[in-house]
Image (tube, helix red, strand yellow):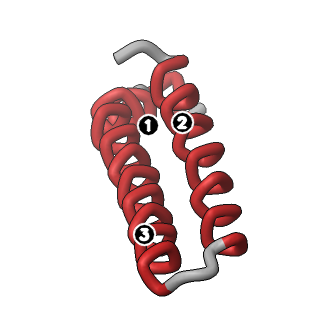
Amino acid sequence: MTDGEPIEQTEFFKRFQETCEERYKDAEHEDDIRDAVHCMIECKVALYTLTIEYCENNRTRFEALTNNDNFRE
């Protein structure tokens, strides 16, 4: 994964979330409301998953930096 990729994915899901919220506001029928809520939940799960993956992928690099004697000085 490149450094820019998680940010691009996050922006995509944020925009998709906004679309889902608009669908929810415009929903007139129970099925439409349910679909919009499901869409919002999927977006939230995707964003949390991206956050967790990003943190896990960068944990080793962060640990290496914080264990470096030059970093502490």
Lower sequence index among marks 3 and 2: 3
**The C terminus: image quadrant:** top right
Asked if disc 3 and disc 1 are in contact, CB closer than 8 Å, the reply is no
Q: In which quadrant of the rendered view does residue 26 lie?
A: bottom right
Q: Residue at position x 30%, y 33% from top?
A: 57
Pointer 3: residues within 10 angstroms few (<14), some, or many (20+)? Answer: some
Question: The disc labelled 3 sits on which kind of residue?
Answer: Asp
The span from disc 3 to disc 1 (Cα, nearest Å) is 45 Å
**Considering depth in this image, is 11 or 40 the residue closer to the camera?**
40
The span from disc 3 to disc 2 (Cα, nearest Å) is 51 Å
Pointer 2: residues within 10 angstroms few (<14), some, or many (20+)? Answer: few
Q: Mark 3 vs mark 2: give the one in front.
A: 3
The span from disc 1 to disc 2 (Cα, nearest Å) is 7 Å
Q: Where is residue 64 in the image (x, y as percent from the top left)?
A: 34, 28
Q: Residue at position x 41%, y 34% from top?
A: 62
Lower sequence index among marks 3 and 1: 3
Q: Is residue 1 left or right of residue 20?
A: left
The residue under label 3 is 35
Question: The disc labelled 1 sits on which kind of residue?
Answer: Thr
Extreme-top residue of the structure: 2
Asked if disc 1 and disc 2 are in contact, CB closer than 8 Å, the reply is yes
**The N terminus: image quadrant:** top left
The residue under label 1 is 66
**Considering depth in this image, is 32 or 52 the residue closer to the camera?**
32
Q: In which quadrant of the rendered view does residue 69 lie?
A: top left
Q: Which mark is residue 72?
A: 2
Pointer 1: residues within 10 angstroms few (<14), some, or many (20+)? Answer: few
**Considering depth in this image, is 5 or 43 the residue closer to the camera?**
43
Q: Position of residue 8 (x, y in %)?
A: 56, 26
Q: Mark 3 vs mark 1: give the one in front.
A: 3
Question: The disc labelled 2 sits on which kind of residue?
Answer: Arg
